[in-house]
Image: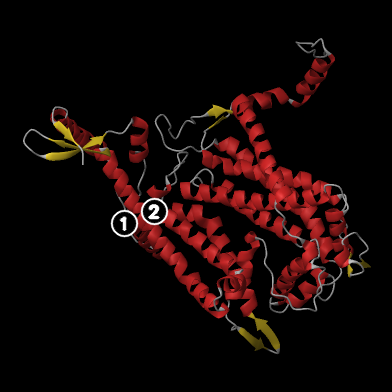
Amino acid sequence: MSASTDTYTPKTRVGRITNFVDTRVGGSSIVKEFGRKIFPDHWSFMFGEVALYSFVILLLSGTFLTFFFDPSMAETHYNGPYVPLKGVEMSVAYQSTLQISFEVRGGLFMRQLHHWSALLFVASVSFHMLRVFFTGAFRRPRELNWVVGCVLLILALAAGFTGYSLPDDLLSGNGLRIIDGVIKGIPLVGTYISLLLFGGEFPGTDIVGRLYVLHILLVPALILLMIAIHLFMVVVHKHTQYPGPGRTESNVVGFPVGPVYAAKAGGFFFVVFGILAVIAANFQILAIWDYGPYDPSPVSAGTQPDWYIGWVDGALRLMPGVGEFVIFGRTVSLNVLLPALAPAGLLFTLMFAWPWIERWVTKDNREHHILDRPRNAPFRTGIGVAGVVFYCVMWAAASSDLIATHFHVSLNDVTYWLRALFFLGPILGFIITRRICLALQRKDREIALHGRETGRIVRLPHGEFIEVHEPLNDYKLYRLVNFESPQVLPAQPNKAGHIKRTEKLRGAVSRFFFEDRVAPVTPAELEAAHSHHAEVEAPAEKAEVSGH
């Protein structure tokens, strides 16, 4: 057998090295295939890119910080340049954080860049998930990619909390104290889990080191894995797109990755990097020297956690002091465990299950690559807004003490109002949002049939006054008429002619989902309206035009 030879031998050294690598890993075919992928162009798709770029900045800034941070809870006395804390007993972790802030060149900037990047990462992931939900991008074949996104959101929260707790200052210590209370609220095994996690009675001696391992190793590795799976599925399933002329379920209208999106993505990365750098250089965040080292003995005003964790703290504040009882000599504190786990469990369970819930109700198992306008899916949009209101009420409750002090109102009154909104807010948000969506659909239907109002009043030859309407162009008209509006699907009998209870439930939910609907404009209605419009416009062109 003769050895195979390359059909092309580059003359330069760089060319030979490149050819050597390419013939063994197939890089050119990968780049060629990926570079041909078409991506649509819309501003809402940028949230995913912002999440990716902020995570890259997190990795870069975090790598810098790991060179100087010491995750030890051993006790020491501070002798650094920050005079107010000289001689104060503190942990080595807190001391090393002060050294990064005041002694390492660029250390404070990198700390703040890391923190602001973390906030932007969680925010962009959240907005990206909201965009996917409100536009129906989670439907087949992207259900598993939606699940990956939900896991990625949970990992982002975990990364933020573990990093937030590392400096071992008073603020992060109070947050860990809440976690310790929640863990101890678990019946029978809670105390033992707390002792194992903290390395003894709170605050223990091991928690910072263990959180450090999670923060710099396990959680980032899982996030990278989820990002890789997410991008792989985006390439496999092709990108979704908004409705428009020439856009169908079988094509993608946009620009290729190379060179158009490669250039745009590179520039956008530096835009995100630059904005974060400006914010980190000019806006202080988490001034740990103001809080001092953590000491479990004094009682402070409580935590003011970052926004993405605050909703869990808010749920604890809203819970009344009930639900604690003794069983067989053991105290069960549901007033701590229930608010800490139930709202988050409910929210994430609905998020994970929603693609299958919607498919079960509609019995729609088709592939969807064209996105919905949120107004054209009133029930889904209402549910999404209800979830946002549910989250925002708990988030506001995490700052109930600040609301009371800043607005000079009673703390108890703030708590009572937020408790009422906890239950009524999502219901009101759902009802109001669905009615707004239906009203917008009716407005779109009117505009599609009759055109846009111009404000010009025309008097016809026989004396009638009419307002001249301007016809829409094809693109705007397509957006208004080309969408699906599911109808109520009653309970269907099975092959034996019987209707099961689950099918009756599905029929009832379908009626609740879609009983109030605005039917899309049909081609016949559109043709009739345009014919009538042409009949009116013909004499109007010859009529006298007058202002209002």
Q: Say above or below: 308 vs 459.
A: below
Alpha carbon separation for disc pair 1 and 2: 9 Å
Q: Say left or right for 150 vs 250.
A: right
Read off the residue under disc 1. Answer: 516
What residue do we see at 62% from left, 41% from top? 49
Snapshot quadrant of residue 25: top right
Q: Amino acid at mark 1?
A: Asp
For label 2, the SS is helix
Q: Say above or below: 392 vs 67.
A: below
Q: Say left or right for 518 vs 12.
A: left
Q: Residue furthest bottom?
A: 329
Q: Say above or below: 326 vs 197.
A: below
Expressed as whole percent of the image width and height from the top left, the position of residue 547 reads: 20, 38
For label 1, the SS is loop
Circle 1 packing at 10 Å, graded few (<14), some (14-19), many (20+), is some
Front-most of residues 540 and 49: 540
What residue do we see at 43% from left, 44% from top? 372
Tags 1 and 2 touching, CB below 8 Å = yes
In this view of the protein, can residue 355 be seen by the observer?
yes
Task: State the mark number for residue 378.
Answer: 2
Q: Say above or below: 301 vs 327.
A: above
Count of marks overlaid on the render = 2
Snapshot quadrant of residue 291: bottom right
Front-most of residues 22 and 506: 22
Which of the two labelled residues, at mark 1 and mark 2, occupies the earlier sequence position? 2
Circle 2 packing at 10 Å, graded few (<14), some (14-19), many (20+), is many
